[in-house]
Amino acid sequence: MCKRFVLLIVPILYLVGCGDSGSTGPTPNTTTSTPVTQTSTRQLGEGSGRVTSQAFSMVTGSVGTPGELLANANWSVDEAILWMYIVDGACTPQQFAAEACPFDAGCECEILARSEAPVPKPRELSVPNFGPGGFGFIIWNVGDVDTNTSWQVRVRSTTSSSGPSSRSQSSDSDAVTVEMIAKKPPS
């Protein structure tokens, strides 16, 4: 009886070990390519100068590669009250100097970012997903004292690729210029 029992167990184990898993052949070896993401920040321009009371300085420029536009300013006189704006590139200094800007519906400038507070110092504005295109960065001294300012405009872009390496895009169409215009603050 022992022999029969052993003979029945061996074929059953053999069948269990050879079950059908639905596979018709060897499993292929697959490799998944992980996207490589790189963030780079390019400086578009920087400068310094005096912004007199009740006047503004406007930095205009263009960005050739889309990204987050970053503009910051610092000033030397703590009592100075500076308001800052990033506007669409179609806005000219003369349009911003018009009485309607920046608060009335008649203002021809599209304001993309604004800060109308005396603090913090220094201050940074940003416009995510900007460009390619033109911009203006306005530093408006609405106070009663002149002040020296320093400013910087940058663009931060993120690129990704499926390959093992990724090159940051650069652009030959990045440029900035500076202009200062007198403008009375709102009453």
Image: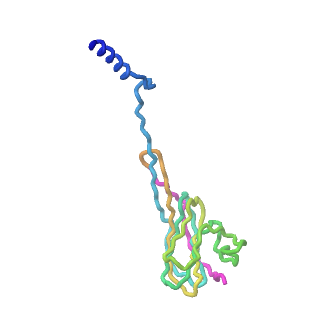
Q: Is residue 37 left or right of residue 65?
A: left
Give percent across and percent down for residue 104.
70, 74
- On the image, which quarter does residue 61 sit in? bottom right
Q: Is residue 57 visible?
A: no
- Residue 91 shows in this picture: yes
Decide if residue 38 is on the left or right side of residue 184.
Answer: left
- What sort of colour scheme is used for the picture? rainbow
- Which residue is farthest front? 1
- At 59% from the left edge and 71% from the top edge, which residue is drawn? 114
Which region is colored magenta? 166-187
**The N terminus: image quadrant:** top left
Q: Position of residue 77 (x, y in %)?
A: 49, 84
Q: Quadrant of the C terminus?
A: bottom right
Is 164 rendered above or below residue 79?
A: above
Depth check, front residue: 68 or 154? 68
Task: Between residue 3 and residue 123, name the one nearer to us.
Answer: 3
- Write down the quadrant of residue 115 in the picture: bottom right
Q: Relative to 166, say whether 50 is above or below.
A: below
Give percent across and percent down for residue 55: 60, 81
For the point 36% across and 23% down, which residue is it? 17
Q: Say if 145 sits above or below 41 in the image.
A: below
Residue 185 part of the magenta segment: yes
Whether 137 is among the magenta residues is: no
Q: Position of residue 138 (x, y in %)?
A: 58, 73
| Numbered marks: total | 0
Residue sitting at 47 percent across and 61 percent down?
A: 41
Residue furthest left as drawn: 2
Residue occupying the point 65% across, 67% down: 110
Q: Is residue 160 left or right of residue 57?
A: left
Which residue is farthest bottom?
144
Q: Main secondary structure of the magenta part?
A: loop
